[in-house]
Amino acid sequence: EDDKALQVSQNLVPVVSQETLDANPDIEETLNALSDVLTTEDLAEMNGAVDLERQKPEDVAQAYLEEQGLLG
């Protein structure tokens, strides 16, 4: 928990090149779905899991995506 308000509020925006979108047409829908649910608080919790608890980033990301119903 950020009890000292050190983690400022942020607008989370995925940035992808047009070339990547053209090569992977489904990625836009996937990123939009992620943007709909990902919050600054979620990101801070995931960063803590990786930085403080030493969990693997890919494991933290997978667990989050599964919890949000974004993998299927």
Image (tube, helix red, strand yellow):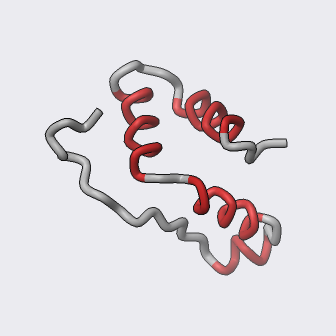
Which image quadrant is residue 52 in? Answer: top left
Q: The N terminus is located in which quarter? A: top left
Estimate the x, y position of residue 69 in percent, counting from the top left.
Answer: 74, 43
Percent across and percent down for residue 46 are: 46, 36
Q: Is 9 left, or right, of 47 in this rendering?
A: left
Q: Residue furthest left?
A: 4
Q: Nearer the viewer, residue 51 or 23?
A: 51
Q: Residue at x 40, y 66 (%)?
A: 11
Q: Quadrant of the C terminus?
A: top right
Determine whether, in the image, residue 9 is placed left or right of residue 49: left
Q: Which of 57 and 30 lies nearest the eye of the viewer?
A: 30
Residue 63 placement, left or right of 49: right
Seen in the picture, residue 53 relative to 37 is either above or below; the reply is above
Q: Where does residue 41 sit, x and y in percent of width and height?
A: 40, 45
| Residue at x 61%, y 75% (from the top left corner) | 17
Residue 20 in the image, given as x and y percentages of width and height: 70, 71
Q: How many marks?
A: 0
Residue 10 figure quarter? bottom left
Q: Residue furthest right?
A: 72
Q: Which residue lies at the image location 49% right of the left edge and 67% below the top edge?
A: 13
Position above or below: 51 against 23: above
Q: Residue at x 18, y 46 (%)?
A: 6
In this picture, residue 4 sits left or right of residue 32: left
Foreground: 13 or 67? 67
